[in-house]
Image (cartoon, rainbow, N blue to C red):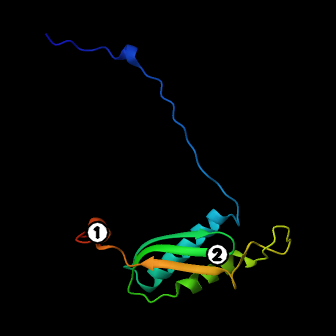
Amino acid sequence: PFITPKFSNMVEARTFLFSSESVNEGHPDKLCDQVSDAVLDACLKADPLSKVACETATKDNMVMVFGEISTAANLDYEKIVRDQVREIGFSSFVDDLSSVESKGLSCDNCEVLVRINKQSPDIAGGVHIGKDDM
């Protein structure tokens, strides 16, 4: 004979934790997001079929943009980075932690590292090659 288990006594209490990060204007994480977004926007504006996987990191008057981008556009990534850093308002760097003039990053003389390659064929094959909607 089939016995129906009784689940009414087996109610399990569940606890869910929700966590999120919030940073203020000028925080390096926000700057990096805005630079990556500016690169994405420039790619899509010039070539709507661009494939963009771009990240940004910053530290000590340096901004590095890196990742894989496949686009027909011919873009000056350093200019995109500098223009976005300028728009955000980072216009002075003094290598002195006690400086009140330093904003921590200078759009004009910061080091900009660009490490962008074309999208790997393995990723392209798994993500969009042969997909009808692309």
Q: Give the amino acid at mark 1.
A: Asp
Quarter of the image for residue 84 reads: bottom right
Tell me the tag on residue 1.
none
Residue 23 percent across, percent down from the top left? 67, 57
Marks 2/1 in contact by CB < 8 Å: the verdict is: no
Quarter of the image that includes the N terminus: top left
Q: Residue at x 66, y 77 (%)?
A: 85
- The residue nearer to you, when weighing 89 against 93, is 93
Q: In which quarter of the image is residue 24?
A: bottom right
Q: Which residue lies furthest to the left in this view?
A: 1
State the residue at coordinates (60%, 80%).
112
Residue furthest to the front: 95
Residue 62 — which label?
Answer: 2
Q: Residue 76 in the image: x percent, y percent?
A: 52, 88
Residue marked by disc 1: 122
How packed mark 1 is, by other alpha carbons closer than 10 Å (few <14, some 14-19, many 20 or more), is: few
Left or right: residue 73 versus residue 101 is left
Q: Distance between the residues labelled 2 and 1?
A: 31 Å
133 relative to 66 in the view: left or right: left
Q: Could you tell me which secondary element the residue under label 2 belongs to?
A: strand
